[in-house]
Image (cartoon, rainbow, N blue to C red):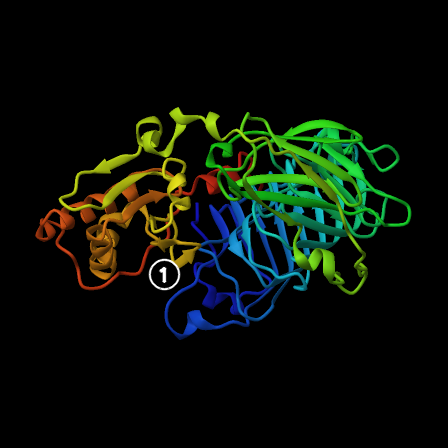
Amino acid sequence: MRESAVVDKALCARHRSNLAAGCHRGWRVRKISGPAGSQTDLTFFNNSAHASGFGWHLKPPHAPPTLNVFQNFTAFRCSTGMFYYGTGNIFHDDHRFIECGTGHFMNHLSNGPHTAPFYHNLVLVGNIDQNPTFSRGGVGVRGPKDNEYFYISGLTVINYLQSAVLHGCFETTCTMRYERIRWFNSTRRTFSYASQSGIYWDMDGTLTGYTNGFVSLNYEYMHFPGICSVVDEHVNGVMCGASDGSVRVRRLLVNEQQPWQLDGKLMNVRTSAGFDQVAYDTKKLSGWPVIVLENETFDMRVDDPNDFQELAFLYSTRPYVMESLGYIYNQTTPMDEAIIVHVNFTDWRDHYDADASTALASQKIGVREFELPGPGRLVQGGADAVRCFYKEPGTIVVNCARRSGTASVEMRGEVEIYWLPMTEANMEHACKCYMNEYGQTLLDALQQGKTVAVHCQEGVHRSLEFAQQLHAWATGKREETGLPISMPELPEEDSEQEEVEAAAVPSERIAL
């Protein structure tokens, strides 16, 4: 079995009219160092991948500064037709994913509101048989899980039968736009994930039957008569639309809540149509992504004796509301949008959940606190374990992110955040390098009585390594860390769980 047909992005411009077959990764794009790796005008034309784990594979993330056009690609019986860990500013024209387990799989997208569609004239075929009884294809398109502005213009879906074709935006309830869709022998169009899922925006009526129709996760409070309904084509979803195209379904993000005891609780939402509960998101939003229908009234209250003292509302994303959007076929027209929100307040200040206070958080959720000779605090744990420290003014949060790239420091309110990319494979050496660069600053903060909270986005091994090295320095054992002089280039980590979910070695091979 071949590993891949193309192993760096410098070669992409040379490869046309070729076939990759029986590979783990058929066509692979990786950014390389040197002048060849800095080119921005890549082309990829008239290539195919057959019976491969990934027909196309891009990781680590890469988004060129200028729009790149990739044309005429076919993935046939691959586990995943196209896999993108993270990308943007690429225009895919005239692609076909035929009998693939997953056609398109994406984690992150960095497009803007007016970027050309990610796919233009895409064809998905679930089964090539003339009279199929099942679909070999599972997911047709899994859009980004957390970023706005995913857009497809021109989609033909054939023989997916009962398999739901469109998925995505299940970590932030972002919006995905679709237009010019044709359906053949495919009765399940969208899939909405329980707890949180994206908003599908039908720009021309080919997804829902309504221009400016929308599909979102099915909440009872969204069952407005004559506007929203539950239909079989949209699994776990509710479809909303009107003949004049005046409907708008948006995400209302409710966050920045105080007191912190409200974190993690359900949000009760009631409208004239019904009642339901919205789950709190701890991973990306730190708040409640409430689906709302424009021009309606929503009563909200956290399912807890406590009530809000402070909170913020963010209605949709500005370009969706204020700007005309589209490509060369359709343009949306901005309209006045408004909702009414009722929020209860009951003074409960003497009855807060004291036994869940931040003082006891380390005992309840596994935060490790290191003993220091000075007045500062050094704590370490997983992402959920140290989440409360993001709200403590003056705290320094060190995020040992599992990714490649360069380190950065940012301010979020009165909290300073260090983003330090590393992998399990190089974490010891990477931590030593970061200690050489930032160790003295962190040590000074500890001596001033500040808190340094170290965590990973996933797991705890990287943050534990960094905290142990910082602790050794703070207790006068710096020589034990053996700090190097410079930071090496971080290798790509191929053990990403999402990549395993996206594709496995295909079970069926074909004769070529």
Residue at point 19% right, 45% down?
375
Q: Is residue 126 visible?
A: no
Q: Position of residue 300 (x, y in %)?
A: 66, 34
The amino acid sitting under disc 1 is: Thr
Binning the other alpha carbons within 10 Å of mark 1 as few (below 14), some (14 to 19) or many (20 upward) gives few
- Quarter containing the N terminus: top left
In front: 174, or 23? 174
Please tell me which residue is depicted at 42% across the width and 43% down the height of the picture.
496
Q: Left or right of 78: which side holds 330?
A: right
The extreme bottom residue here reads 35
Left or right placement of residue 359 versus residue 281 in this view: left
Q: Which residue is mark 1?
A: 406
Residue 279 x, y percent position in the rendering: 58, 32
- Residue 390: give x, y in percent of width and height: 40, 45
Query: Which one is in front, 397 or 91?
Result: 397
Residue 162 placement: quadrant: top right
Residue nearest the observer in this picture, 292 or 230: 292
Choose between 202 and 512: the one closer to the eye.
202
How many numbered circles does the render carry? Answer: 1
